[in-house]
Amino acid sequence: MSSLASTTEAWDKHVQSYAPPCRQKSFFGKSNEDPNCFESSAKVYGLNKDKFNPKFHSWTEDYFTVCHYDGMVPGEQSLIVLQEGDDFRGVKWDDEGFKFVATRSGVNAWIPCKVLRADEVDGIFDVVYFRKHESDPDSPYHYLRRNQRLRSELFGFHMKPYKGDAHWKGAFRHTIHFPDEMFPKQWMDLV
């Protein structure tokens, strides 16, 4: 049997036995019947189309909010320093957002952030970015950078690590081979 035929056969078998990860769930919520229900990565697309809906601003076990590096306000006026036990407007010193922050210095395009307030009329968010001390990632202090006027195009939703569709246990995984005839002879220089 050719590798193309085995891939086709595997796909056909997958389609016949496929069951959606969440049979009874709505697009924006988990099923009450299945506590292990898997959220589709398509949800993030929908969330990013409805950024100002406050019911989506709270992090879930599947997704979190991010803000682009370009929206971070430099300077001391935007810096908030948290010590163990501190809380700034609901963001605690041990918030899970600090786990998602890269420990290396440098620019990260998207950084975990939390929404403090959203203003759909003006198209802005009041957010805090999660930061670590640039030169001492083991510092006992945790840092937030606040931007009270973040433009909506610098705000979005992302799946949490290992929560996207590619990590679903029922996803189709199979080696896919392409016939050599599909490629020009000039590309076949490794023969």
Image (cartoon, rainbow, N blue to C red):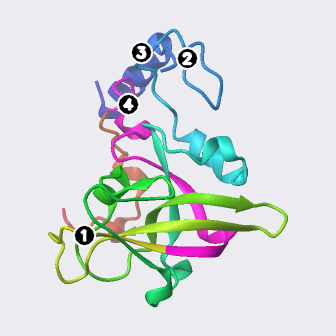
Chain-order first, disc 1 or disc 4: 1
Residue type at numbered disc 2? Ser
* Residue at 52 percent of width and 41 percent of height: 41
Q: Quadrant of residue 58?
A: top right
Residue linked to disc 3: 13
Give 10 or 33, whichever is nearer the viewer.
Answer: 33
Q: Amino acid at mark 3?
A: Lys
Mark drawn on residue 64: none
Which residue occupies 18% across, 67% down?
140
Camera-nearest label, 1 or 4: 1
In the displayed structure, 59 sits above or below 35; it is below
Q: Quadrant of the N terminus?
A: top left
Report how far apart the C-alphas of labels 1 and 4 lie in the structure: 36 Å
Farthest residue, direction front:
85
Q: Looking at the figure, which quarter contains the C terminus?
A: bottom left
Residue type, label 4: Trp
Query: Residues in magenta?
Result: 146-173
- Depth check, mark 3 against mark 1: the one in front is 1
